[in-house]
Image (spheres, rainbow, N blue to C red):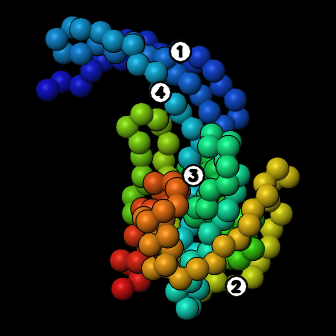
Amino acid sequence: MAEPKVLSERVEYENDWIKVIASKIQFDDNKTTDWTYLELNNAVILVAVDADKNVYLAKEWRLPFQKYLTELPIGGCTAKSEEGIMKQAHEELMEEIGFDCKKLVRLCPPLVSGRMRLMQHIFLATELFPSKRKGDDYEYIEVVKMPLDEAIKFFTAREETTSATLAGLFLAREKLK
């Protein structure tokens, strides 16, 4: 099966965080269709686990749901190199939960989505130590600490969260076995 051909693309909307892109696509049978997709800033996602296997989560108000969600610390990532991505991961840890780490390990290749251009870099952060950095003025975050296994049960049983949070927690549990 041949790859579809992108006949045209135009940006319908753009700001610092997102682009909405309209595309006209042609398939190998010459049929065409219009597709729209989102292009978002990439992200770093941190599974911060202390020596007692507690995970640190961020409870933050999320506009699309108009409520607080508890999730892994996450932040935008504009870096392209592995060194730059890891630097931004350390910065997010300090901004969101007030810790940094001595050990930062990538848990998987970047997660992607079929309907948007976004790469989510998930890291396991261990050997934590206190280190605070000022976050964005509009971020109001409550740090939630709980055992890793309890966090997995919490989210799979009753609490809404992001898919990256679930993926990160399960990957971290496997890595820490």
Q: Earlier in the sequence, mark 3 or mark 4?
A: 4
Q: Residue at x 67, y 62 (%)?
A: 59
Give neighbour class at mark 4: few <14, some 14-19, many 20+ (Cα, 10 Å). Answer: some
Give the residue at mark 1: 10
Q: Quadrant of the C terminus?
A: bottom left
* Tag 2: amino acid: Phe
Could you tell me how far apart the alpha carbons at marks 3 and 4 are, in whole angstroms? 17 Å
Could you tell me how far apart the alpha carbons at marks 4 and 2 are, in whole angstroms? 40 Å
* Tag 3: amino acid: Ala
Q: Residue at x 52, y 56 (%)?
A: 160
Q: Earlier in the sequence, mark 3 or mark 2?
A: 3
Q: Which mark is residue 129?
A: 2
Q: Is residue 103 visible?
A: no
Give the residue at mark 4: 37
Q: Residue furthest front?
A: 158
Q: Which mark is residue 43?
A: 3
Q: Earlier in the sequence, mark 4 or mark 2?
A: 4
Instruction: Out of 29 and 168, give the one closest to the viewer.
Output: 168
